Image (cartoon, rainbow, N blue to C red):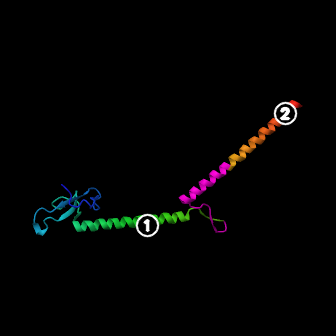
Amino acid sequence: HARKRPDLPLITCTTCSIHKILEFQVKKDKHGNQGRIFYKCAGRNWDGTGCDFWKWEEEYEDHLAEIAKKKAEEITETRQKDEEEQDGVGQKQDADGQGGNMAQPCNGHDLNRQISNLVVGVQELVVVIKVLIFVSICGLILNSYDVLMG
């Protein structure tokens, strides 16, 4: 059947954690609820046995909002813990009890700068090696000349 509220996700039941939540619409005009949308666990039988999850549309919206709020709080707590752990990374106690920073946390910008500095250092090292090779070759040539002229 076509869903009446496709904007509301059909989540796994938070009561039994087994079945999906299903959407229904009241067909009979019993108790003045005809046309109202409700949500129940697939594990709930029509006689009320099985899983207890059953909510009217408004209650289901509130339920989803509460779940979202809890997830947001969990994410915030996790981020705060990660930041606290990052702040503690590289801290070391010296023998005199003073804290010394062993490593600096770096962000993407710092990493790019460090890589750039490394590339420049390697390029300078290559120049020095080329000069050493040139001087060595010159020394070999002069030594060979001395031996031949000898």
Q: What element carries label 1?
A: helix
- Residue 136 sits above or below residue 82 on the image: above
Position of the C terminus by quadrant: top right
- Residue 101 sits above or below residue 132 on the image: below
Residue shown at 10% from the left, 63% from the top: 28
The front one of 30 and 14 is: 30
Residue 72: horizontal and vertical position, in percent? Answer: 38, 66
User: Does the magenta portion include 45?
Assistant: no
User: Does the magenta portion include 97?
Assistant: yes
The front one of 34 and 126 is: 126
Mark 2 lies on residue:
145
Q: In this view, does 24 lie to the left or right of 75?
A: left
Find residue 77 and name its label.
Answer: 1
Residue 36: horizontal and vertical position, in percent? Answer: 17, 65
Specify the segment rendered in magenta.
Answer: 95-123
Residue shown at 74% from the left, 44% from the top: 131
Residue 13: horizontal and vertical position, in percent? Answer: 27, 59
